């Protein structure tokens, strides 16, 4: 085998081989012995360079994943705010019996917003629908019963 010098771009070829790379593959590509490749690789610290390049690549990937998750969460929060606004508008316009879809939409928005912000979805107080029903019933019973402190005038109006 004629003696050939290992070119300066041998390390680039070595890295391009991916995780299954070997000095034998480099030697075959450039028509040199594996021993010659090992000698150059040791002298130029290919293993350390490869480790450093892989570490930097992982950091970049992790950063991009974190950024894309953050962007996704922001996008989802914007969507949830729109749904929440529409649901609240609907609740203002319709009586409770016909506004259950709005209540369910609000419940879903609250649950998803909690998940995105890293909190438990349940919140420990029951569903939004249950809370609204309880409050509605409480208001209706309170409004129906006159409290002793409220006096009425001759016309039956509260004073």
Image: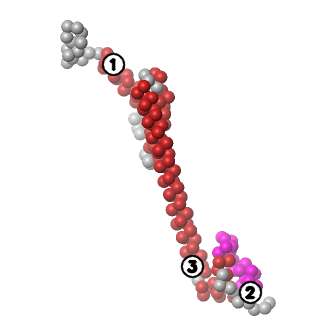
Residue 105 vertical placement versus 73 (above, below):
above
What is the residue that sits farthest to the bottom in this orientation? 3
Residue 48's label in the rendered image is 3
Residue 32's label in the rendered image is 2
In the image, 103: left or right of 20?
left
Residue 127 vertical placement versus 44 (above, below):
above
* Rendered location of residue 29, percent (x, y): 74, 80
Image quadrant where one finds the N terminus: bottom right
Q: Residue at x 67, y 73 (%)?
A: 16
* Label 2 vs 1, first from the N-terminus: 2
- What secondary structure prevails in the magenta region? helix
Q: CA distance from mark 3 to mark 1?
A: 76 Å
Q: Residues within 10 Å of mark 2 (few under 14, many from 20)?
A: some
Q: Residue at x 65, y 84 (%)?
A: 8
In the image, 138: left or right of 7?
left
* Rendered location of residue 146, percent (x, y): 26, 15
Query: What segment carries the magenta color?
Result: 15-34
* Label 2 vs 3, first from the N-terminus: 2
What is the residue that sits farthest to the right in this orientation? 1
Closer to the camera in the image, 136 or 84: 84
Residue 141's label in the rendered image is 1
Q: Is residue 29 magenta?
A: yes
Q: Secondary structure at mark 1?
A: helix
Asked which quadrant contains residue 157, the reply is top left
């Amino acid at each position: 085998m004629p003696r050939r010098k290992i070119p300066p771009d041998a390390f680039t070829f070595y890295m391009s081989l991916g995780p299954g790379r070997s000095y034998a593959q480099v030697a075959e590509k450039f028509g040199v012995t594996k021993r010659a490749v090992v000698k150059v690789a040791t002298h130029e610290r290919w293993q350390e360079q490869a480790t450093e390049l892989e570490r930097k690549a992982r950091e970049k990937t992790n950063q991009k994943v974190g950024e894309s998750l953050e962007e996704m969460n922001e996008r989802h929060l914007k969507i949830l705010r729109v749904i929440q606004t529409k649901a609240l508008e609907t609740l203002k316009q319709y009586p409770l019996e016909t506004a259950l879809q709005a209540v369910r939409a609000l419940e879903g928005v609250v649950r998803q917003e909690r998940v995105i912000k890293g909190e438990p979805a349940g919140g420990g107080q029951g569903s939004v629908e249950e809370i609204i029903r309880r409050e509605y019933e409480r208001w209706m019973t309170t409004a129906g019963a006159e409290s002793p402190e409220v006096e009425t005038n001759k016309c039956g109006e509260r004073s």
